[in-house]
Amino acid sequence: MTYSYKASFELSGKTAIVTGALGIIGSKVCTGLAEFGANIVAVDLNEEAANDFAGKLALNFGVQAVGIGCNVADPDDVAIMVERAVNIMGGVHILHNNAGYKPLVREQYLAPFEEYTLEQWREVMSVNIDGVFLVAKEVGKQMVEQGVGGTIIQTASIYGIMAPDHRIYEGSSYLDKPMASPAVYSASKGGVVALTKYLAAYWSKQGIRVNTITPGGVESGQNEEFKRNYSARIPLGRMAEADEMVGAVLYLASDASSYVTGQNIIVDGGLDAW
């Protein structure tokens, strides 16, 4: 039988869990996965909003979709979320481990390194690395029990593999609030890349592939000053659109990437090439 390259991207009959499903990237990924036929478990803090979003996916793409509320930093919450997802969908084949920390007190989150509190550091880590660990552990365990492999895609950041240029934040704002990129963000996202490589080797015999997607800056409410400053650093000359992250996830989620594991796909307009 001739190999079908187009069919290798087909996701019909597979179930995908996406954490941070209501976020800038997560919502686009859910839409892309559903368009390619995957059933969707949209996971976010607000279950009602996640269910509303899932209902739209089901209506628009004819797939099964459900929203589940979960705090990924809470091990009990994560275990219950995965159990509920499996009970509803019958299994899980794809995980986009995508949830990220949203600062409650922006001044504390953006504090200078010399003044950064351990409490704030641990709060960020509890989501950005502990949450990734907890979700990967529970979903990976389920995939091992199913015995048919699976694919896990974890979201890192360009600042997990290179330092930010702090000069671009001068005069910058996000939704009219000050911008910066604290050390804890870089440390947590660098940890995601390292954990991915570990898990790719650890679960290889079970046929579970684990990869990272590393987005560059995505346009989402930054002021014009920041967009100009950031774009000047990019070979392609602009920030990314959230939709431009989806193709890499679809590739890693599908059989088109059946020989790809332990990799970090960087979608940054060429920033790390300079």
Image (cartoon, rainbow, N blue to C red):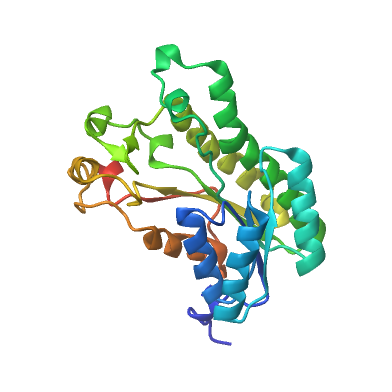
Among all residues in the image, which is located at the extreme top?
114
Q: Residue 7's spot in the image, x, y percent?
A: 54, 80
- Asked if residue 15 is positioned above or below residue 73 in the image, the reply reads below
Q: Nearer the viewer, residue 13 or 86?
A: 86
Q: Position of residue 252 (x, y in %)?
A: 52, 61
* Residue 61 appears in the rendering: yes
Quarter of the image with the C terminus in it: top left
Callout count: 0
Residue 34 found in image quarter: bottom right
Q: Judge whether residue 258 can be spotted in this image.
A: no
Q: Looking at the picture, does residue 268 appear above or below residue 108? A: below
The answer to whether 140 appears left or right of 122 in the picture is: right
Q: Quadrant of the N terminus?
A: bottom right
The one of 194 and 40 positioned closer to us in this rendering: 40
Q: Residue at x 57, y 43 (%)?
A: 196
| Quarter holding residue 226 | top left
Q: Position of residue 54 (x, y in %)?
A: 62, 68
In the rendered image, the residue lying farthest to the bottom is 1
Q: Is residue 11 above or below residue 203?
A: below
**Depth check: 178 or 161 in front?**
178
Q: Residue at x 35, y 51 (%)?
A: 220
Query: Where does the image place residue 214, in percent across and percent down from the top left?
Result: 43, 47
